[in-house]
Amino acid sequence: AGAEKAGAEKAGAEKAGDERQGKSKGDAGGGVCAVDADPSAPYAANTLSALTMAEMVRRLVLFRSVCAASRFPNTTWEDTQQVLYGAQHSLFFRGEQWGGMSADPAIFMQSGVDIAAIDAQSNGLWRIFSKLGAGYSSSRARGEIINNGYACLPSSGSTPGAEFVLSARTSVPLDTTLVAAQALMHEVVANVVQLVFEGKIA
């Protein structure tokens, strides 16, 4: 009787363990495992302003120029170069010269100028670093794009030069494909870059 009781208690413990793990009868044989959905966790709103993001880009790119108190903590110039240009000896992209923020897929800032002419006239001595963020916000039901960037485009001949940081955000209701948000971002950034080169924004 004692052995039977112990066996029953063991079976009861196994059943309780299976229930805690969301298992059902027949799971051991490859059946479906029913798991309770995770509880809905609170999420933190992204409250970074465009000014804050632009300042972060400035401090990152101009690491060697800003005062030590304004630099990202525990960060060296070598660390910053990894962010700007990618890993020096990449395990995945061997032989690639450009990476990091220099190889951002977004070309919004480049599209605002004749980058080919600037490249030719400056012998390639220009830089644009940028970071694209894009997605559909289910909580706000909007397609959103954020583009943070830095540009140093030197003057050459009749082409004026400019150095600036830029942070822009577009948000379009129900734009699940981000097509409208992207078109708006392209227009906005190109217009701002043109105004910078025309001296209307300093």
Image (cartoon, rainbow, N blue to C red):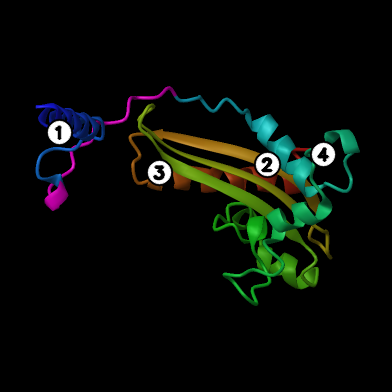
Residue that appears at 63% across and 53% down: 112
- Quarter placement of the C terminus: top right
Residue that appears at 17% across and 27% down: 9
Numbered label attached to residue 180 = 3
Q: Quadrant of residue 201?
A: top right
Of the residues shown, which amino acid type is indicated by label 1?
Gly
Q: Residue 80: x and y, percent? A: 76, 52
Q: Residue 13: x and y, percent? A: 21, 30
Going from N to C along the chain, the mark reached first, 1 or 2, is 1
Foreground mark, 3 or 4?
4
Q: Which residue is mark 1?
A: 7
Q: Which residues are magenta?
A: 28-42
Callouts 4 and 2 close, C-beta under 8 Å: no
Numbered label attached to residue 71 = 4
3D distance between C-alphas at marks 3 and 1? 66 Å
3D distance between C-alphas at marks 1 and 2? 70 Å
Q: Residue 140: x and y, percent? A: 39, 27
Is residue 124 in view?
yes
Q: Which residue is mark 2?
A: 166
